[in-house]
Image (cartoon, rainbow, N blue to C red):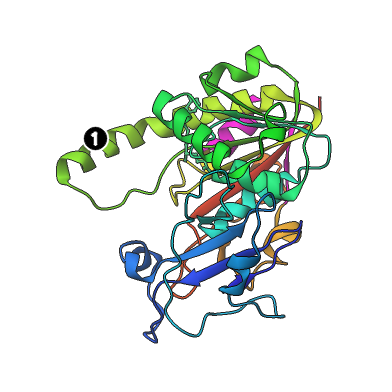
Amino acid sequence: MCLLLTSGFRLYGVMLNLSSSPPVSYRAVLLNPGCWQYGVMLNRFAAVSEVKQHLPLNSSLCFIHPSPVRYPSPPHRQGQLKPYYLMNAASLLPVLALGVEEGDRVLDLCSAPGGKALAILQTADPALLCCNEMDPHRRDWLAKTLESFIPQSLSSTVTVSNQDGRIFGQSEAGMYDKVREENGHVLFLCHPQHGAVRLRERARLPTLQTQLLRSALAAVRPGGVAVYSTCTLSRSENQEVVEAVLNTCPGVELQDLEEELALPLQEHFTFTPLGHTPSLGHTPSLGLLVVPQQGQTWGPMFLSRIKRIY
Ligand SMILES: C[S@@+](CC[C@H](N)C(=O)[O-])C[C@H]1O[C@@H](n2cnc3c(N)ncnc32)[C@H](O)[C@@H]1O
């Protein structure tokens, strides 16, 4: 599949497996890695002509590869930047919603392993992209990702920091035009003991996410925006977090993403209606939710955009 999105993205989704079986639920898709698709995001800082020769280029917006293909992880070549990054195509949506423009100061509050930070740099040339990650091991992973894809000449533009995202907004209040916040994970089936630990971690996530989103909004200057995203279907980590923040943060306003993103991209992603919340006085829906389907396994991805008014 080849998706040519706006903002100069060139993203190619290559199916691992083609099947003619009938549509199955998102749960069946999530539990069957054999049917997952991967997007190939080309790196504008690297030589990509060799990669493009092997990708199914098509003049239409969307192209399904005629045969089952497994696209390899990008090779490491001494002294060369990696030509592409494999990702879930839905990961581009929060980046498109952020709408980074030339000269913006951008904060990626929970950045590791760095896929969306790389995607931001494919869309525009910000004046600053601060990639923050609190976990030291993941911060090292993030730094390696950036090193492998971004030229040295951008080292003063693209910085890595390791603050607790919950207090970042206090220490750098109003310093950024655009802030991206993402936390949470899809809960896959795993060893029962690990599953229990992850369930306990998960119970704490809505509170953590609410604190992170408040902090993200504190870091935004008046007129700027924060995009909140998760890769979960959980209402308590998605709509309820946004609702809690809108109810307690003065001077912020929810923005509608339906016309800007869901309508133009509905051919490529399965958006699930989330409904409106007139009781809160919000006319836009609290966000967009992309749900994976067989043959279009992008997501899960929830995203919401909030503007700081004052
Ligand atoms: C879902 S991942 C982010 C994925 C990343 N945005 C990307 O596209 O590659 C969430 C990250 O948030 C980090 N994190 C969790 N709590 C944090 C906090 N309080 N401050 C900063 N980062 C945090 C986690 O260590 C994890 O690396």
Instruction: Name the spot of residue 98 as percent of width and height, x first.
Output: 71, 44
What is the number of callouts on the image? 1
What residue would you read off at disc 1?
Answer: 197
Instruction: Name the spot of residue 224 as percent of width and height, x first.
Output: 78, 33
Task: Count neighbours of disc 1 (C-alpha within 10 A) and say few if under 14, some if 14 to 19, many if 20 or more.
Answer: few
Question: Looking at the figure, which quarter contains the C terminus?
Answer: top right
Task: Inspect the image, locate mark 1, and give the three-letter code of the amino acid beneath it.
Answer: Val
- The residue shown at (56%, 37%) is 147
Instruction: Name the spot of residue 109 as percent of width and height, x first.
Output: 58, 30
The residue furthest front is 78
**Element carrying mark 1:** helix
In depth, the one of 111 and 198 nearer the eye is 111
In the visual, does 310 lie left or right of 165? Answer: right
| Res. 286 in view | no
Please say whether residue 95 is one of the residues in the magenta stretch: no
Instruction: Name the spot of residue 111 as percent of width and height, x first.
Output: 54, 35
- The residue shown at (30%, 52%) is 188
Residue 121 found in image quarter: top right
The magenta span reads 241-256
Looking at the image, is 208 positioned above or below residue 42? above
In depth, the one of 90 and 303 nearer the eye is 90
Looking at the image, is 32 positioned above or below residue 236? below
Question: Looking at the figure, which quarter contains the N terminus?
Answer: bottom right
